[in-house]
Amino acid sequence: MTKFAFHDGAIVPIADAHVSVTCTTFHYGIGCFAGIRAFWNEEREQLYIFRAGEHYKRLLNSAKFLMSDIGHSNAELIGITTDLLRKESWRQNVYIRPIIYKDDGVFRVQLHDSTDKIAIYSQPVGHYIKKEGALSVGFSSWRRVDDNAIPARGKISGTYINSALAKTEAVMNGFDEALVLTQDGHVSEASAANLFMVRDGVLITPPITDNVLEGITRKSIIQFGREDLGLEVVERSIDRSELYLADEAFFCGTGVGVAAIGKIDHRLVGDGNAGPIAQSLLNHYQKVVTGKVEKYMDWLTPVYS
Ligand code: PMP
């Protein structure tokens, strides 16, 4: 159970970390957030925060879209997060949620002249999608929010209405997760994860300009593919029909990790199980996040010294 939060500039008991009903973000979704994970390494009795610097960079970039200035540097935010996790004394995998919000009352549908705040808390985390084996996914009738409506590359609170519409439609239609197209009909991503496919041994993912969130797992997978698995990795637009023909497809993200897709719109992907490249990337990812790959130790922030 979560005991503490960083709120109004201090680590306080979670029960004291309140926002008012007049909070602007509560009404309009004018906020931005991060979703970071820390992984427990039992042998070393160490908790490693995965790519904290990258997550806070994206958060501060998202804040820039919203003209939110919280007066904390990336390094300070990492320090606060480490203090918070240490105070919780977590000895398990946890999810960390920083959120930047505006707190000016409800009659301020604007970005400028705002009172900007940040809160951070953490909680134990299990599986994001409760399913053994490869996922069955379906294309959503909803389109991904377009960058010239709401910045799609950032993690903006209000954007998640779009994600929730797609996710609920997919689950209520019997799928595990949604695939969402861009306004011009190219494959963008899932409701809260990025997408890769494999065709003829090449690892392919939609470019950020197809209204994709600048995913940190995506960036990591691209590097693993190129440097560690020796694969050709291409960022290019993907047609819906091309995805049906993929040899492999998988999602990646802080929540899902690396999750193989076995069926798309009721058509088998490969033999319907995790393919060899998805499986290798999943194994590698799991080693990296738990501090078992020397090359990537500088991606991890140890919580306990
Ligand atoms: N796309 C969306 C819309 C997301 O919410 C997430 C989760 N943050 C991702 C992709 C994956 O990004 P990351 O690897 O940074 O968690």
Image (spheres, rainbow, N blue to C red):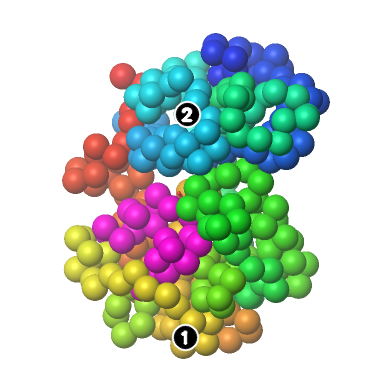
Describe residue 234's horizontal placement relative to residue 98 as left or right.
Answer: left
* Residue that appears at 58% across and 44% down: 156
Question: To which residue does mark 2 refer?
Answer: 91
Describe residue 150's horizontal placement relative to residue 45 as left or right.
Answer: right
* Residue that appears at 24% across and 44% down: 296
Quarter-of-image position of residue 172: bottom right
Vertical position of residue 143 compared to residue 151: above or below: below
For the magenta stretch, what is the residue range? 204-224
**Residue placed most toward the observer, 181 or 39:** 181
* Residue that appears at 68% across and 24% down: 103
Question: Residue 124: within the magenta?
Answer: no
* Residue that appears at 61% across and 34% down: 111
**Residue placed most toward the observer, 235 or 14:** 235
Residue 264 screen position, x and y as percent: 58, 79
Residue 244 screen position, x and y as percent: 51, 85
Question: To which residue does mark 1 refer?
Answer: 242
User: Callout 1, which amino acid?
Assistant: Glu
> Mark 1 CB in 8 Å range of ligand 1?
no
Describe residue 34's horizontal placement relative to residue 202 as left or right.
Answer: right
User: Callout 2, which amino acid?
Assistant: Arg
Question: Residue 217: within the magenta?
Answer: yes
